[in-house]
Image (tube, rainbow, N blue to C red):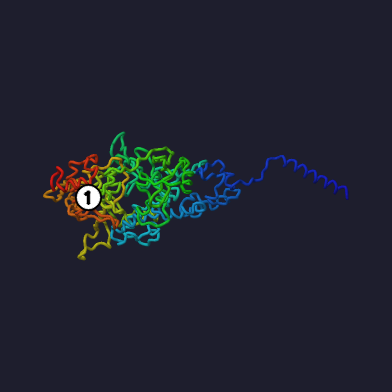
Amino acid sequence: MKLKNLIFISATVSVALLLFSIFSNAPKTTIKIAKPDQCISCHSSMSDIDHAHPKEIFGCAVCHGGNRWATNKKAAHGGIVLNPASLEHASIFCVKCHKDIVKRVSKSMMQSQSGILNVLKYQWGENSDLNSTIGIDELKKEVKSSLATDHFRKLCAACHINQSEKIFKNKKIARGGGCSDCHRVSKTNKNHHAVFTSRIPTKNCLKCHNRSNRIGLSYEGVFESAGYGTPYKHGDFSHKMSDGKRFYYKLPDDIHHKLANMSCIDCHTQKGVMGDGKKHHHMEEAEDIKCKDCHKPKFKKANTLAETLADTNEKIEIKSPIAYTKKFKSPLYNVQKDKNQTVFYRKADGKRFNLEKMSDKPYHTLAIHKRLDCSACHSSWMPSCYGCHEVYFENGKQYDWIKHKRTKGQWQELRSFLRFESPSLGIGYNKKIMPFAPGCQVIGTLFGVRSLLFTKKGKKSRPDLYKFHSLAMAGWDPHTTQKKSRTCVDCHFNPASLGLGRGNLDIKEGNITFTPIYNSIQSGMPFSYPIDAFVSVKGKQFQSTSRKEARSFNRAELDKIVGAYKCIICHNSYNDKIYKDFNQSKKLFYSGKTSCLKQ
């Protein structure tokens, strides 16, 4: 071998050895593969979404998508989803672990809103069947809106859990986002992921449940005023709603809120809220919880679901048999048996409370009260908006919450007669006596509706105006429960409670007479009966209902209820001796062996 070749080889090896020595001691420049995905390399300081989804186990891409092994930002973020909890994305990402829940939520009442749409189209005469619509999904395919669906699109459809959050200019009232709508309790910032929880605070529920029957407001003792602010102090109205446009009065809050600061989730089960997998047409079909489930419970050993829910909650430990709902057999893991005591644990923090069991005293056990729903006696007040004047301008424009843009047709709501005291009673959807309130009473004025310009006689009415009205009453639990019930007199001789409206009630020659305060004709209404009247003293029902089973009291029921007032005048307390054995007392009365007035 020539000398120059040996020199070249020797030099090459020396350089190689030198380079190896340098780079073996130099900092590593190669990229280390992160676990469980490459996203953690850049987002290592990002906090966990909650204790059940630690990033060290799940990473980021399993929920958000993107390229989990990419080493640069552009490639890694390709196809990334910011909110995998929206239902269209949840069916791709969340479904990997929560298949059953995603399926149920997609069919739930909170997503479909079919109950509101069904009732609206039925009451406005557009459908003869109360179970004919499927809600939001139906409206997305609608080519031309009817009057009722246009009203729903612009005044109701903002509230469904998969609404787009981006469309809300006022972020204080933003809702939607799929699973985020309920479970998210904080927003994402630079180093903190949005926090999700199963301990959902009531404020999340109130984003939507502050209109219609207003049960979210009522539960906290808030009654929306007639449209003017009160009280006035410090240069501004103090009782403002979150939207800044509505005002309220402060009334007694529900006893569950007052005594234990219970959240909505303390009663309402996951199936009752997120659905049971079936498409329901009305809220009571999806509702799960009943008062007796907690106050007259049946205890069993905790099942696997109960253990999972308690573990997810973190604040409650299952130490003994738990209660279950009667309807869907949902585990109430926060209602447990401790010897002979029923114990309730608040889901927010696990605080313990002793629950009172339903008593077996006469007011609960008498046969004459078997048809009473708990809410009939224990609801202290109920928001009742009599006469909702809906004004429609065909040539106006308003935001459509389904199309996410302004479309032709504008609605304006005006109030007539708001009351909260002495809720009306009637026969509810459950065939029991329960509180009733307007649901809804629409008095409509339509401007510029060319297709509705003819009267029944075929003559033209005003070329720019058409009127209609649809008055309905609906029964529900107003969520204003108190331990002390309504008085016997309030139910048996208060005309408002009987459904007659507000006025003067009397009994003359054995017949009920009633003189109303509200004069509909003088108030310019297109009907003669009082606007707050559900029924006449003769049992004629004035207003419709939105359930086949629901109705006002009939003549025989009114006579029986008012007739009992004769006894209540003297025997107005259940501590009275006649109620110790009421059947025996009746026998003595009818046989003339008592000092009462003869009938």
Q: Relative to the observer, which residue lies in front, 430 or 395?
A: 430
Q: From the viewer's perspective, is 120 left or right of 86?
A: left
Asked whether residue 227 appears in the rendered view, the answer is no
Report the residue that reaches farthest toward the left.
Answer: 509
| Residue 430 % position (x, y) | 31, 53
| Residue 568 % position (x, y) | 19, 43
Mark 1 residue crowding within 10 angstroms, few (<14) / some (14–19) / many (20+): many
| Residue 554 % position (x, y) | 21, 54
Q: Give residue 265's quadrant in the image.
A: top left
Q: Which residue is mark 1?
A: 499
Report the residue that reaches farthest toward the bottom.
Answer: 458
Asked whether residue 319 appears in the rendered view, the answer is yes
Q: Relative to the observer, which residue lies in front, 582 or 75?
A: 582
Is residue 436 positioned above or below 138 on the image?
above
Q: Relative to the observer, which residue lies in front, 424 or 556?
A: 556
Numbered-mark total:
1
At mark 1, the secondary structure is loop
Q: Give residue 28's quadrant in the image.
A: top right
| Residue 111 % position (x, y) | 40, 53
Question: Which amino acid type corresponds to the residue marked 1 in the rendered image?
Answer: Gly
Is residue 436 positioned above or below 251 on the image?
below
Q: Relative to the observer, which residue lies in front, 168 or 493?
A: 493
Q: From the viewer's perspective, is 163 left or right of 499?
A: right
